[in-house]
Image: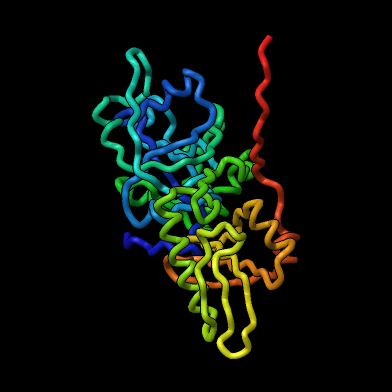
Amino acid sequence: MPTRTITRDNLGAWLIKCDPESKYDLPSAIEAGLEVVYNWSVSRGYRSQMMEPGDKVILWVSGNGRRMTRGIWGVGWVTSHVRDTVHNNVEPGEETFWHSEADRLAVTNDVSVDIPLFEDGDEISSEALLAAGITDLEVQMQAQMANPSWVTKEQLAAIEALLEEPWPEYNEADEEIVVSLRGAGFGDPVQNLAVEEAAMGAVIEHYDGWRHDDVSLDKCGWDITFTHKKTGEVARVEVKGLSGDRRVVLLTANEIRAAEVEDHWYLAVVTRALSGPNVTEYTAEEALQAALPYVFKAHMPEVNET
């Protein structure tokens, strides 16, 4: 079967795989109390680099079916970008559920997810998928393809029809927040820096005919001050870069303050910053209307213990 090209337009969900017989002992983890999968290893490559918070994800169990039924054992969401794996030391007697320490240490990349596991008996078996006419999933046709696999939007619709419960709601609070000198964002700090720089360049190009002054490190509440070369008009632009199309950004308290009090303040959201930048500009009023309280930093006073 020829491999189809994955795009944001045809992606329905990512599919991450587990072989409980050879790599990770998922049945024992479940017996020990695992109910939700929050992290999973993925292969380094363009697929894992495409994974974004807010993407749907499916947990697929492969293997011979002796200990766990082959098929879908959970559905949920990606909650971070892919990152390099940090291998913490394992305390003596601590159970990691990897079949070997070598398998655990061989993981080079992982991603945060939120996948509630199905109860035993509620899984969607490979036989049930076939009976429903779902026969062309990549994991069915090319089982040895690297993690992550994927399903198209059409395939996802067919899978969702087999779910006994609706797809769980996405909880944005599960996304990792990274604060840098330029502001706050979701995901991996190295990825964020590349996205930020690409977004800044896209907005500067968007403001053709304007002089620009990068003030992103000055903590004034916006990133670039633009001055029109002919009219002298000024625009104070806060730039938010995204690697995908989902327009969810984080605004700091200082950026909210600037939007409230500064004249000619604008929010420029750059989607697909690394692949095909698209700049959308919002007024201060539009940004403030869309902003919701998300994270509060509380400096708590010391209390004398009695």
Q: Quadrant of the N terminus?
A: bottom left
Please say whether residue 133 is visible from this viewpoint. Answer: no
Residue under the point 47% across and 18% down: 32
* Left or right: residue 9 compared with residue 93: right
For residue 31, above or below residue 157: above
* Left or right: residue 247 compared with residue 262: left
Residue at the extreme top of the image, as rendered: 306
Viewer-proximal residue among 125 and 228: 228
Q: Quadrant of residue 266?
A: bottom right
Residue at the extreme left of the image, as rendered: 102
- Residue 103 on image: x %, y %: 27, 31
- Residue 10 on image: x %, y %: 49, 63
Viewer-proximal residue among 61 and 187: 187
Please say whether residue 114 is visible from this viewpoint. Answer: yes
- Residue 213 on image: x %, y %: 51, 72
- Residue 274 on image: x %, y %: 43, 65
For residue 53, above or below residue 108: below
Residue at the extreme bottom of the image, as rendered: 230
Residue under the point 63% across and 75% down: 235
